[in-house]
């Protein structure tokens, strides 16, 4: 038996040695791991001689998780036994570890008997609280949530018993932050547990252990595990109370004055108001000067009144039905929007005596759609205020629990947060988590535990906080501001509250949530709870409380009285950068968009030059040589160069240009090459970044985006709203994919100005055209954009050049441009006018390299006598007349084919083939607003021509349904017939945009082009 034991312990020792060898090889391998994972292994490199004299605590905290599991503990115990038998039998680092740690523990009076295993278990317990403490935190004010407390928060799980509670344990003097950092290595288990419960299981549940950055975790641990995390003095508490009273009375007041109105009140979540205000105060203390806020319906009016400080009289006036705002200069007021969608901006003082600018962005009902818009606007502000560190301009988004979990755009927006050309230094997210979405329980509304789980993908810390504990809410909000200013990344505050009434005030919530509403009915408000607490603590007396209540009520009443006479004085869309811009009823003249020839030559050379030592790809080099040649000769300028010239000339004039979208740097069709790559050292060069001497790096930004449409278009929308002197463009990979961003088109781009009186000059490039690439790479759904255009098909507006306000009155412009020069001018026109309008461009694919789709430099300049020059100089051509027919009257023409886009080149080709000299082809370059004047001019020119609309899209798509009534109006007023006189040539109606069979495509395309040229008349309708 003795022999067996001996053998067995020898075998064990051998096993331990084998493990040690393995451990050493792990240590070597670990050097390749990212920094944060290296710490544990680095302790192995101390030599025995160096390590011996001074007992050094070995940071167990640095052990990786795998070492903390059960088998590792057993393994370490085995090691310990081996070490006790023979210290030389273990690796020198383990020797040091056991001497320092166990030696201390074993000899310290009062902690006798603590084993390594107990230490490990204790550490695991601490860690369990850090990871899982939030599961036990007191988060639900209604206490209805059924929760399972994880086993690993139970000391018994680690083998501790009642008897251990008052035993002292050695915790170490760890080089870890927070709880383990204190210089009190020996504590009783009872104290340890109490502290852990206080830190992690109170009114705030912290989720941060998913963050893989030690510095960030330690920073948070320091904040969370400090013995007195939040101690507000009496003065602060009065301020918090005051703010809570404002938030609460505001809703009560609206409820009593407008009993039947929908206001999507904040009742049950009123602590949001003091939380936000304290967050903003803290942010201001830390250097924030401007905050852009996005939020949906819930509590929006309260935030507008109490946080942003929109005049209460104005809010009340809007509640009473409101007067349509009247501008002192003009009368344009758009369609307006419901009161809980309107935006505004104000300057307000903070508690710390600073001033902060707050703007709440107007938003549609579409939940979360405003998120990327806010982030883009914030980035725009950062550019214009030279906020390189991104600490002066902050974006704050307020979400609902249902929408934060459910809406995909939340994830898309979060995913922009660290991208170099989209980051804003962190957005602060606040979730007003009232535990219900309309009538839907979280159980049916999401698959994850928390509604905020999506933010974990971004390694954002998440603070869940009980909305009934106003001080905890304030603390979490302040901490979020500190985090953002410290780490410049996103952070989430999840205020878990409830909704006292229905989804809106007219809704009956007990139909669907009877249990919840039974509890809510008897549940005191956050204000009642806080007031009671302060009164009981003696920090405030009833008189003081009454005084605040009376003050708030009397102000609300005074504002209500003055709201009756409230007259909105000034439209507020003219923020600083926009002064001087015209509203739709103020005439803005058409301006010359041509550029002096010498400037064109100079910038042309600059953008075609690649630095000498830059090793561009051979093919790219050739492209640039060809471009340089085009500039040199002034001939054959192609699409990409036309675009680059528009950008370059705008830059020279001091404008900011930003183009973003998927693969826009090279260009989906490999035509742009706005950024080129050194093939040897992988450096990048952006020719348009060097048009000016010492050009600001961001002045020309071209950036590949994340693979998102909704968020990226929303972002650029917000960016473009910030400053009119910027040409902001978003390009879809193919136009088809733009419908992933449909909400932005519908709710912001096409209707934003009309609803919210905010202009935007965003340009959207949508590759479009039938080349036989199948149903998903042919159509940008031109018809959708035209259908959303608001120009009246039956009324011809004032078209005189000196009085024309047609574009200003229209909601946007839709163009399908066919020459590089016209593309150049339409881009420049966006900036060279006194108003801003979104521009939708059906951009070409095969025209990018088409032999005939070229322009001469003389079409870009402003020289009298050059093509396109007229009284205003050189301008964008809304219609390109047939180059074959110059006289004002062409009586011999039997057919006038009107078309738009690349089909023109195919029609022209066919005409040449069939000698169709009696057919004229006109290109409508600007479809919306409809160029009535130019169409009528062409109709007059060809008095005997059959009028044909030709398109390559199916009949139910493309421009046909938009063109037909407008063309008809133009013809009727000239006595040229009506609807039945407009012939259609194009594809038949279809469900899919295009055929998937190339042969079918070719047949269809050939037929339609041939038909447009056929000698016999075309039957009506086709
Ligand atoms: C994209 C979108 N889908 C549906 C709706 C209709 N809707 C309005 S509020 C609401 C519930 C929102 O729940 P939650 O996000 O939890 O906010 P709460 O109203 O509870 O504050 C819904 C479904 C909407 N406005 N937007
Ligand atoms: Mg909700």
Image (spheres, grey):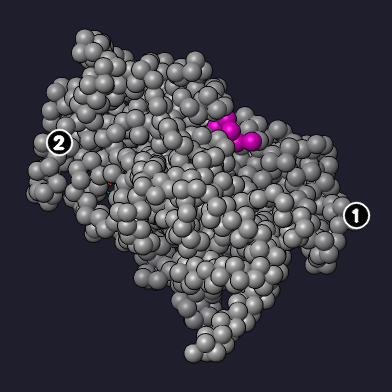
How far across and how far down the image is residue 287, in percent?
A: 57, 27
Residue at mark 1:
612
Q: Secondary structure at mark 1?
A: loop
- At 50% from the left and 29% from the top, the residue drawn is 283
Q: Residue at x 64, y 64 (%)?
A: 94
User: Is residue 197 magenta-colored?
Assistant: no
Q: Nearer the viewer, mark 2 or mark 1?
A: 2
In-front residue for pair 441/238? 238
Tell me the magenta residue range.
Answer: 389-393
Quadrant position of the C terminus in the picture: bottom left
Residue 714's x, y, as percent?
47, 46
Label 2 vs 1, first from the N-terminus: 2
**In the image, 734: left or right of 785?**
right
**Where's residue 324, x and y in %?**
30, 23
Q: Nearer the viewer, residue 120 or 398?
A: 120
Gap in angstroms between the C-alphas marked 2 and 1: 75 Å
Q: Residue at x 49, y 22 (%)?
A: 356
Residue located beneath label 2 in the image: 523
- Numbered-mark total: 2
Overall secondary structure of the magenta stretch? loop
Q: Is residue 375 visible?
A: no
Of 227 and 493, which appears nearest the observer?
227
Q: Position of residue 353 (x, y in %)?
A: 49, 15
Quarter of the view holding residue 122 = bottom left
Magenta span contains residue 390: yes
């Amino acid at each position: 038996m003795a022999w067996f034991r001996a053998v067995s312990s020898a075998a064990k020792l051998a096993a331990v040695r084998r493990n040690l060898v393995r451990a050493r090889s792990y240590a070597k391998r670990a050097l390749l791991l990212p920094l944060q994972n290296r710490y544990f292994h680095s302790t192995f490199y101390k030599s025995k001689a160096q390590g011996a004299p001074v007992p050094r605590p070995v940071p167990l905290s640095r052990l990786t998780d795998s070492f903390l599991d059960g088998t590792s503990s057993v393994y370490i115990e085995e090691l310990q036994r081996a070490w006790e038998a023979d210290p030389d039998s273990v690796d020198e680092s383990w020797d040091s570890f056991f001497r320092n740690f166990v030696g201390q523990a074993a000899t310290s009076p009062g902690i006798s008997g603590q084993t390594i295993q107990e230490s490990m278990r204790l550490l695991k317990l601490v860690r369990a609280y850090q990871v899982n403490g939030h599961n036990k935190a007191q988060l639900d004010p209604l206490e209805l949530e059924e929760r399972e407390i994880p086993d690993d928060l139970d000391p018994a799980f680690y083998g501790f018993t009642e008897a251990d509670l008052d035993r002292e344990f050695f915790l170490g003097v760890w080089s870890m932050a927070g709880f383990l950092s204190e210089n009190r290595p020996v504590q009783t288990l009872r104290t340890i547990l109490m502290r852990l419960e206080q830190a992690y299981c109170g009114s705030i549940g912290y989720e941060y252990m998913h963050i893989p950055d030690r510095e960030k975790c330690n920073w948070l641990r320091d904040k969370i595990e400090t013995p007195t995390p939040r101690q507000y003095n009496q003065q602060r508490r009065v301020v918090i109370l005051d703010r809570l009273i404002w938030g609460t009375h505001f809703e009560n007041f609206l409820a009593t004055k407008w009993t039947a109105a929908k206001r999507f009140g904040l009742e049950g979540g009123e602590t949001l108001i003091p939380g936000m205000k304290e967050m903003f105060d803290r942010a201001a203390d830390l250097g924030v000067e401007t905050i852009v806020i996005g939020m949906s319906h819930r509590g929006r009016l309260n935030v507008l009144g109490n946080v942003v400080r929109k005049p209460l009289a104005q809010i009340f006036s809007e509640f009473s039905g409101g007067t349509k705002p009247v501008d002192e200069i003009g009368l344009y007021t758009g369609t307006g929007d419901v009161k809980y969608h309107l935006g505004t901006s104000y300057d307000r003082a903070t508690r710390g005596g600073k001033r902060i600018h707050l703007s709440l962005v107007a938003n549609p009902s579409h939940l979360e759609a405003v998120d990327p818009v806010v982030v883009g606007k914030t980035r725009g502000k950062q550019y214009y205020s030279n906020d390189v560190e991104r600490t002066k301009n902050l974006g704050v988004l307020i979400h609902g629990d249902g929408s934060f979990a459910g809406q995909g755009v939340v994830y898309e927006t979060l995913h922009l947060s660290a991208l170099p050309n989209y980051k804003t230094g962190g957005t602060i997210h606040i979730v007003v988590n009232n535990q219900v979405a309309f009538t839907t329980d979280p159980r049916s509304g999401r698959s994850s535990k928390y509604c905020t789980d999506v933010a974990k993908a971004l390694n954002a810390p998440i603070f869940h906080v009980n909305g009934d504990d106003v001080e905890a809410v304030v603390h979490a909000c302040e901490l979020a501001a500190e985090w953002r200013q410290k780490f410049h990344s996103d952070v989430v505050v999840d205020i878990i509250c409830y909704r006292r009434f229905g989804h809106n005030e007219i809704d009956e919530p007990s139909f669907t949530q009877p249990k919840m509403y039974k509890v809510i009915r008897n549940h005191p408000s956050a204000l009642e709870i806080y007031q009671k607490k302060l009164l009981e603590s003696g920090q405030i007396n009833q008189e003081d409380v009454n005084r605040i209540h009376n003050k708030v009520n009397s102000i609300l009443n005074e504002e209500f009285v003055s709201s009756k006479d409230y007259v909105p004085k000034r439209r507020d869309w003219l923020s600083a950068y926009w002064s001087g811009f015209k509203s739709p009823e103020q005439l803005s003249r058409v301006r010359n968009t041509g550029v002096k020839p010498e400037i064109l030559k100079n910038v042309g050379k600059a953008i075609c030059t690649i630095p000498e030592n830059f090793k561009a790809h051979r093919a790219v080099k050739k492209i640039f040589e060809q471009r340089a040649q085009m500039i040199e000769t002034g001939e054959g300028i192609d699409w990409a160069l036309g675009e680059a010239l528009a950008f370059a000339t705008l830059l020279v004039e001091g404008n900011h240009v930003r183009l973003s979208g998927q693969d826009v740097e090279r260009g989906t069709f490999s035509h742009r090459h706005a950024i080129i790559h050194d093939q040897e050292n992988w450096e990048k060069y952006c020719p348009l970044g060097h048009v000016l001497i010492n050009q600001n790096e961001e002045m020309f930004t071209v950036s590949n985006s994340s693979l998102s449409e909704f968020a990226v278009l929303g972002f650029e929308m917000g960016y473009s709203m910030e400053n009119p002197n910027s040409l902001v463009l978003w390009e879809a990979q193919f136009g088809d994919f733009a419908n992933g961003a449909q909400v932005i088109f519908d709710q912001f781009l096409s209707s934003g100005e009309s609803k919210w009186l905010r202009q935007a000059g965003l340009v959207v490039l949508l590759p479009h055209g039938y080349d036989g690439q199948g149903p998903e790479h042919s159509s940008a759904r031109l018809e959708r954009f035209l259908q959303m255009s608001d120009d009246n098909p039956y009324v011809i507006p004032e078209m005189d050049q000196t009085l024309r306000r047609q574009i200003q009155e229209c909601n946007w412009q839709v163009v399908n441009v066919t020459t590089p020069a016209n593309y150049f001018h339409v881009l420049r026109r966006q900036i060279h006018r006194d108003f801003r309008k979104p521009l939708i461009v059906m951009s070409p694919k095969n025209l990018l390299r088409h032999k005939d789709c070229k322009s001469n430099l003389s079409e870009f300049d402003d020289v009298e006598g050059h093509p396109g020059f007229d009284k205003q100089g050189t301008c964008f051509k809304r219609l390109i007349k047939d180059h074959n027919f110059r006289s004002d009257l062409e009586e011999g023409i039997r057919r006038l084919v009107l078309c738009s886009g690349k089909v023109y080149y195919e029609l022209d080709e066919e005409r040449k083939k069939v000698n169709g000299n009696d057919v004229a082809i006109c290109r409508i370059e600007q479809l919306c607003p409809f160029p009535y004047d130019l169409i009528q001019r062409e109709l007059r020119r060809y008095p005997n021509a059959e009028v044909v609309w030709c398109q390559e899209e199916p009949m139910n798509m493309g421009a046909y349904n938009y063109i037909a009534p407008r063309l008809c109006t133009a013809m009727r007023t000239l006595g040229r017939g009506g609807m039945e006189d407009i012939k259609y040539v194009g594809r038949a109606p279809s469900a899919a945009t295009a055929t998937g069979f190339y042969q079918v495509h070719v047949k269809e395309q050939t037929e339609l082009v041939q038909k447009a040229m056929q000698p016999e008349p075309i039957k009506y309708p086709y």
